Amino acid sequence: MNIASRKHRAVPFSFFYHHMLRDVIATVEAEYDREAGHDYSHRVTNAIVLAAFATEATANEIGYWLQVHHTQPVAVTGKFEDYRIREKWQFLAHCHGAPGFVETGQPWVDFATFVDLRNALVHPGAYTDPSTKLLRVLDRLDSLGCTRPGADWLESAMTVRTARWVRDTILAMPEALRQMLAPRLDLHNEGFSWVWEPDRLSAM
């Protein structure tokens, strides 16, 4: 006897994860005690993981929409959901002759840094020193003013400032993609315009 529903989810997962991310960051900011002399919060790890969920879901939803676009569908080789996250965003950014993300420019540099930070949390070594990739992440966070002195890299990087940077980084990706695709594609086709609306971004 089946109890759980077998129906697909009607509400986009990206909405779900973005709203959860917004709530976590609001909690981190509310708990920030300036008198403590630091802005470390273990909840920032939650924000990073939720941001990874959100950017993956957003890419999948845009990829699906492009494949079923009413007037300008895009052909995908293989199953789009199986692409790696960097591959997904670059694929989307090259649709209909769009130039793609410049990997030495923004927002790609910070997005790639975010992905490496997420990977360091999801695939941690056992008592190992930071990898070369993680050291580059820490260098970038240092340069952005997101870090603090700490007992280890996690305590140094998990700050309110990092949480805000993560939020801004994942929101910059669909906006940059929108700017690339807008001259080439009807972005309001079949009611999918929600992903491009600035109100959704400002709600974060």
Image: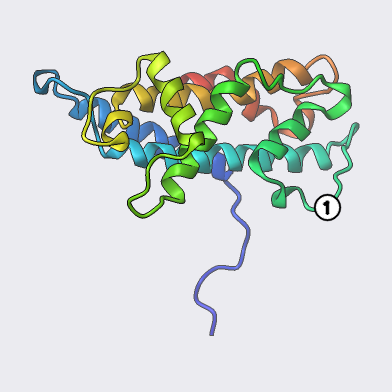
Quadrant of the image occupied by residue 155? top left
User: Badge 1 is on which residue?
Assistant: 78
Is 55 placed left or right of 128 in the picture? right
Q: Look at 72% across and 47% down and name the residue there.
A: 83
- Residue type for callout 1: Gly
Q: Is residue 6 visible in the rendered structure shown here?
A: yes
Q: Nearer the viewer, residue 77 or 15?
A: 77
Quadrant of the image occupied by residue 11? top right
Residue situated furthest bottom in the rendering: 1
Q: Quadrant of the C terminus?
A: top left
Q: Look at 68% across and 27% down and name the residue there.
A: 193
User: How many C-alpha atoms fall within 10 Å of the one at disc 1: few (<14), some, or many (≥20)?
Assistant: few
* 14 relative to 141, above or below: below
Q: Look at 42% across and 37% down and name the residue there.
A: 48
Question: Residue 150: x, y in percent?
Answer: 22, 30
Q: Is residue 16 visible in the rendered structure shown here?
A: no
Q: Considering the numbered disc 1 on the image, is that residue within a helix, a strand or a loop?
A: loop
